[in-house]
Amino acid sequence: MLIEASSCPTSMVYWPVTWRLEGRYSPPTGTDFVTSERNKTHGLNRLIHEISPYLRQHASNPVDWYPWGLEALERARAEDKPIFLSIGYSACHWCHVMARESFEDPKTAELMNRLFVNIKVDREERPDLDAIYMTAVQAMTGQGGWPLSVWLTPDGSPFYGGTYFPLHDRHGLPSFRRVLVAVAEAYRERRGQVKESAAQLRSALQRTSLVNSAEGSLDPTIADQAFQGLLRSYDRREGGFGLAPKFPPPMLLGFLLRYHYRTNNGQALQMVVHTLRRMARGGMYDQLGGGFHRYSVDRYWLVPHFEKMLYDNAQLARSYLEAWLVTGETEFRRVAEETLDYLVRDMTDPAGGFYSAQDADSEGEEGKFFVWKMEELVEILGADDARLVAAYYGVTEHGHFEGKNILHVPADLSTVARRMGVPAHQLRAVLDRARPRLLQVRQSRVKPGRDDKVLTSWNGLTLRAFAFAAAALSRDDYRLVAERNAEFLWRKLRTAEGRLLRVWAPASLTGDEPRARYNAYLEDYANLIDGLLALYQLNFDVRWLEFSRELADAMIEQFWDEEAGCFYQTSHDHEPLVARLKDVVDNAVPAGNSVAADIIGQLAVLTDGRTRASGRSYASYAEAILLLLREAMARQPLAFGHLLSALERRLVRPLEVAVVGPPADPRVQALLAEVRQRFLPQAVVVLAPSDEAARALAATIPLLAGRSQLGGQPTAYVCQNFACQLPVTDRQGLAAQLKALVKNSK
């Protein structure tokens, strides 16, 4: 029942509820629910035909669920019934609670079926619907979250909503049945008020797409104001921003690292380091299996909501690697590698795609898979080792989570060793042998459910993380993971005509052949382009650069608002909905416009700088987005972490490195490593394997024009704004040039 960030940075009106939740209701005659033949025969509703694991979880409900589509909307119009729209996702704990309490309850289902046309939506498949109706509920109630419960008129206009409703009145919340009755009565008896509320909300939704342009320029004061705003929200004791619940802030940490890079501000770096340490040592991090849970319910990063999301782990792995490049702290590298290894082990489809999420619940209990009792440690490890392991991981006899323990690291290893009276190396040895044994036992437990659908956007984020890690760590296994994922997305998430798609489901979900569906959204294009650009700069296969450029041109053609600027969330030929919104707020995942501003800036440097369709410069689109949101970034930095990083790219001079030489040559690898093992957020890297290849590629990649090997040796050219230093052939010379140019670029 939580939402991370505020809604769009545009004015919203909070509409009053126009009826009270009271009274009894008798439905009109002649509109009773008639089950489908499939439901009669098999006890299943229409959702059994869907590929979303979340929707299929509800296929056996006694509710006559529809997926979103014309069939449901036309039935609502024909029978003049309001629509009940329920939006959630498979790893959502409170979605499961409401399902068990209400949607699986025959009496509640009978009420729903008589009074409403009921639609179930997976927010991860349909972020457009989720954005529209979440914005509406926030406008009505001042808050939002999942499960999202919204009542609509037959044309799709919202008129009442909320989040989780319990089966019985409790904690100040009305029962779901009471809400159903009251809403249906209002729709029947006070239709004028309902229509007025729906019209007001629809008008407000349409206004959220209007991002007012701001006068001014893109200057460092925007980032300075944003930094001061983050400083005010920063939790100096525990790291992160705000108190509780506390969400991982990878995009804000990325901005702070870039702000530190440009300004040498020590506070910015300290905020990053402290936050990453506290998260890595808390219960929100899976100390045995690697990877991060969704968020912490407390200030201390101790008790998580136990679901694991692909997008969190992709972004956080990158955050830890970037911090390792800046600080050299081995803990950061370890956490990054453990997180990526978790994704390879538990979240990768045999075909190469990454799955979406791991559930919070197993055997009907949240977190059961992950927690421990002291006696379990003794039984598995023996009393002596268990005593040391318990001290390190904060395990007690009484526990701190429903009588059990969430493994966390309350003190560093040397402190615990001293407290327990053993040498640090002995404690390390005990931990090293205990971890695989505990992990083996845990793997024998009933595992949490997994959402096996593959989303283009989140895969783009993960592709970016693996490509970045492969380069920074010189890990060939990560390169293979990234290449396989890119090949999968290229082959499986495009139509025969080349149109990008949103979601792919394996045969285990479809019951037949794997299949993809839904036209891609802005975030799908932007994040996939970001991942492909990182992959190109890893293996220098020019087809990934060409593919990213093809996608960028299609993104501009299909999503750009020529009149007001910014990209729409949906393409110009998307199905008509009650509003067409713009994705501008960085929330759990970066906003499509934020990523677009960043990757278009990269394309401007890597290519000839102009779109092939219109001839307009790539840089002009990035600048337009940043200008439109400059004031919002400065005033509300918590909502614009990734966009602030895109701004930082704009505030420093580009750094361009061109290498000519065979990629397998150790001397070439040494030159590349000198670039990759530094934190250079504004750098782009290109490579030609030979002089002939450089000439052939120059039309596609102007940075390679006129580049050749000196004396037959691999050669590097370091440039800023296409003004280059003298070519160098050794790593030491390249290091000296990079150091000097980085100093001058700020």
Image: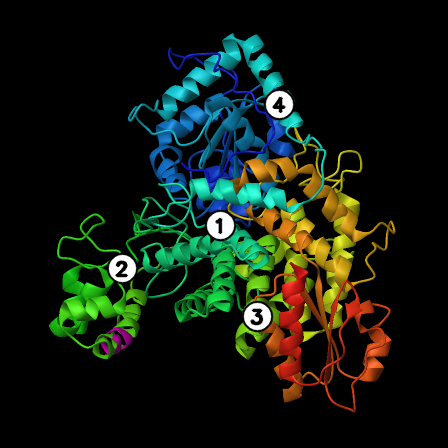
Viewer-closest of 427 and 351: 427
Mark 3 vs mark 1, foreground winner is: 3
Task: State if disc 2 and disc 1 touch (CB < 8 Å).
Answer: no
Residue 629: x percent and y percent? 65, 38
- The amino acid beneath tag 3 is Arg
Q: Is residue 525 at all visible to an observer of this figure?
A: no
Q: Give the label on residue 678, or none.
A: 3
Q: Quadrant of residue 479?
A: bottom right
Quarter residue 449 falls in: bottom left
Task: For the residues labelled 3 and 1, say whether their Cβ atoms are less than 8 Å apart.
Answer: no
Closer mark to the observer between disc 4 and disc 3: 3
Place of residue 621 in the rendered image (x, y in percent of width and height, measured from the top left): 76, 46
Q: Are marks 4 and 1 in contact (CB under 8 Å)?
A: no
Q: Which residue is mark 1?
A: 53
Identify the colour scheme used.
rainbow
Residue depicted at x 55% and y 50%? 51
Among numbered discs 4 and 2, the one appearing first in the sequence: 4
User: What is the magenta segment's predominant secondary structure?
Assistant: helix
For label 1, the SS is helix
Q: Which residue is mark 4?
A: 204
The three-letter amino acid code for the residue at tag 4 is Ala
Q: Does 429 appear in magenta?
A: yes
Secondary structure under the numbered disc 3 in the rendered image? loop
Real-space Cα separation, disc 1 to disc 2, in angstroms: 29 Å
Q: Earlier in the sequence, mark 1 or mark 2?
A: 1
Closer to the eye: label 1 or 2? 2
Q: From the viewer's perspective, tell me whether residue 426 is left or right of residue 697.
A: left
Tell which circle, 4 or 3, labels the residue nearer the N-terminal end.
Answer: 4
In the rendered image, which residue does mark 2 sit on? 407
Nearer mark to the viewer, of 3 and 2? 3
